[in-house]
Image (cartoon, helix red, strand yellow):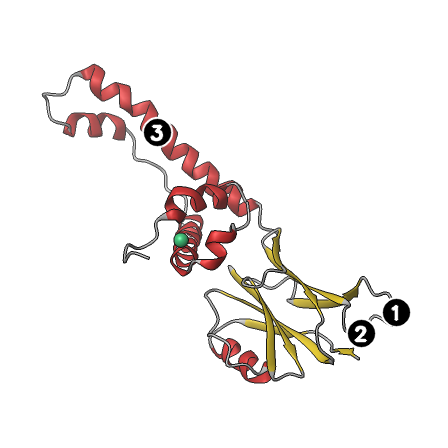
Amino acid sequence: MSGQPCDRFEREGLARMEAGLPPDDHEIGCSTCQSAREDYERLGRALAELPPIKAPEGWERRVLDSLPASQSATGRLSWMPWALGLAAAAAIVFFIWRLDRPTPGPLSVRQQVVATSSGRRADSAAVGDSIRVSTQGGSGEVRELRLYRDTTELVARCPGDPGCAIVDGAPRLTFVLQAPGSYRSLAIVGPQKAPEPAGALDEDARAASAAGASVEMSRAVDVE
Ligand SMILES: [Zn+2]
């Protein structure tokens, strides 16, 4: 690894973000790209919150008049529609991006047993079964799911775990249960990345909450 900071978000991730696509595998594993995304999301929010501004009458003429006289009139005028088009496109992108976000309900987290061969109830499972954890609602750009066994052992994170997928901007974790115990998930949604987990459910929930995030825990699934 060289000491060069990663610029892949600018080269690839930004286009994905604008297209509404989830972070790719590289971005999920790259802290530089993740923080670049956070910066662009912050920028997007800041632009979206700007009050509408009406341009003063005759501003185009004043801009043209202030340019050095050596530039030909054709030269000046040829880039104007292009620049205005670009500015309009940027405004539209942010407008749509904002419209695209539905008003969120309260944060909730759902933990479901899937592919159970044993025909058990939804809140109990056997080693070898899978559970799927998903979250809805809450407001904030940074969403994370953490799955704990017996409330003291962090067994998976989303983003971060191979069983993690980002669906419509929200993390969804599918996890194969490899050991008996009581499994519970923690959903964290906030304006910034939550503090790194210390490993215990209650402690991590408190730390995230203290950092300004909304947190929600699932019901426990008991695995025999
Ligand atoms: Zn990167």
Spot occupied by residue 10 in the image (x, y as percentages of width and height): 37, 45
Residue found farthest to the right:
119
Amino acid type, residue under disc 1 in the picture: Ser
The numbered dot on residue 85 is: none
Kindly tell me whether mark 1's CB lies below 8 Å from ligand 1.
Answer: no
Whether residues under marks 2 and 1 lie with C-beta atoms below 8 angstroms apart, the answer is yes
Between 221 and 45, the one lying in front of the other is: 221
Sequence-wise, the earlier of marks 3 and 1 is 3
Determine the CA span between mark 2 and mark 1.
Answer: 8 Å
The numbered dot on residue 84 is: 3
Q: Residue visible at 48% across and 73% down?
A: 212
Kindly tell me whether mark 3's CB lies below 8 Å from ligand 1.
Answer: no
Left or right: where 26 falls relative to 120: left
Sequence-wise, the earlier of marks 2 and 1 is 1
Sequence-wise, the earlier of marks 2 and 3 is 3
Where the N terminus falls, by quadrant? bottom left
The numbered dot on residue 118 is: 1
Amino acid type, residue under disc 3 in the picture: Leu
Q: Secondary structure at mark 3?
A: helix
Determine the CA span between mark 3 and mark 1.
Answer: 63 Å
Res. 49 visible in picture: yes
Residue identifier under label 2: 126
Q: Residue visible at 43% across and 43% down?
A: 12
Kindly tell me whether mark 2's CB lies below 8 Å from ligand 1.
Answer: no
Spot occupied by residue 48 in the image (x, y as percentages of width and height): 44, 49
Tell me which corner region of the image, top left, top right, bottom left or bottom right, holds residue 38.
bottom left
Between 20 and 8, the one lying in front of the other is: 8
| Residue 86 position (above or below residue 50) | above
| Eye-nearest disc, 2 or 3 | 2
| Eye-nearest disc, 3 or 1 | 1
Q: Residue visible at 41% across and 33% down?
A: 88
Spot occupied by residue 177 in the image (x, y as percentages of width and height): 72, 71
